[in-house]
Image (spheres, grey):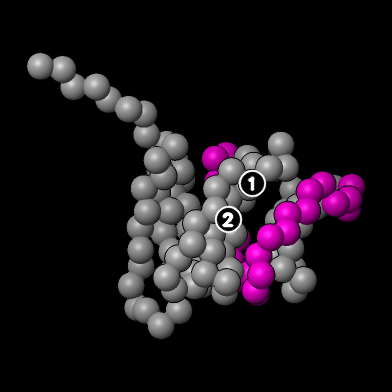
């Protein structure tokens, strides 16, 4: 499978062997700047000039996360284990690193 960020603001997932469209994810209101696979190929994270990050679950074709940012993300990278997401943003030289809360389990520390 390959994920494509298209000019019509839609992320499309295509099976390269059969050349068929598998999934289509819309929702961004401006140009998509980057996409990245996560969770072992189950999720796609997309960034857009509309200052949002969207996380979709490919097998269920559902939106599982939507985040509004103060500056539009221009690039996304996901750590190999999926614990962290790194982003770069317009008008910034910083690299922001985000912890993926879904990758960490709760730990109860007793007295």
Q: Residue drawn at (35%, 58%), measured in percent from left and top?
A: 97
Q: Earlier in the sequence, mark 2 or mark 1?
A: 2
Image coords of residue 32 (percent x, y): 63, 69
Instruction: Report the residue marked by disc 2.
Output: 54
Q: Left or right: where does residue 8 sit relative to residue 18?
A: left
Instruction: Report the residue marked by disc 1.
Output: 63
Which of the 4 quarters of the picture holds residue 105?
top left
Q: Are marks 2 and 1 in contact (CB under 8 Å)?
A: yes
Establish if 110 lies above or below 30: above
Q: Left or right: where does residue 32 sit relative to residue 67?
A: right
Which of the 4 quarters of the picture holds residue 39?
top right
Establish if 58 lies above or below 96: above
In what element is the residue under mark 1? strand
Q: Residue drawn at (64%, 46%), measured in percent from left and top?
A: 63
* Quadrant of the rendering where the C terminus is positioned: top left
Q: Is residue 4 visible?
A: no
Magenta segment includes 89: no
The CA span between labels 2 and 1 is: 7 Å
Image coords of residue 82 (percent x, y): 46, 43
Q: State the residue in front, 6 or 41.
A: 6
Q: Residue drawn at (36%, 48%), measured in percent from left and top?
A: 99
Magenta segment includes 23: yes
Tell me the magenta residue range: 18-40
Which of the 4 quarters of the picture holds residue 35?
bottom right
In what element is the residue under mark 2? strand
Q: Residue furthest top?
A: 111
Q: Characterize the local packing of mark 1: few (<14), some (14-19) or many (20 or more) Cα atoms within 10 angstroms.
A: some
């Amino acid at each position: 499978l390959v994920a494509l960020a298209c000019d019509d603001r839609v992320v499309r997932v295509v099976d390269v062997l059969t050349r068929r469209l598998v999934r289509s994810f819309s929702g961004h209101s401006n140009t998509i700047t980057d996409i990245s696979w996560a969770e072992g190929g189950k999720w796609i994270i997309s960034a857009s000039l509309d200052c949002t990050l969207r996380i979709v679950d490919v097998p269920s074709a559902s939106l599982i996360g939507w985040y509004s940012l103060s500056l539009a993300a221009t690039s996304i990278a996901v750590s190999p284990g999926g614990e962290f997401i790194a982003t770069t943003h317009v008008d910034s030289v910083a690299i922001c690193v985000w912890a993926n809360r879904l990758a960490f389990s709760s730990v109860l520390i007793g007295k």
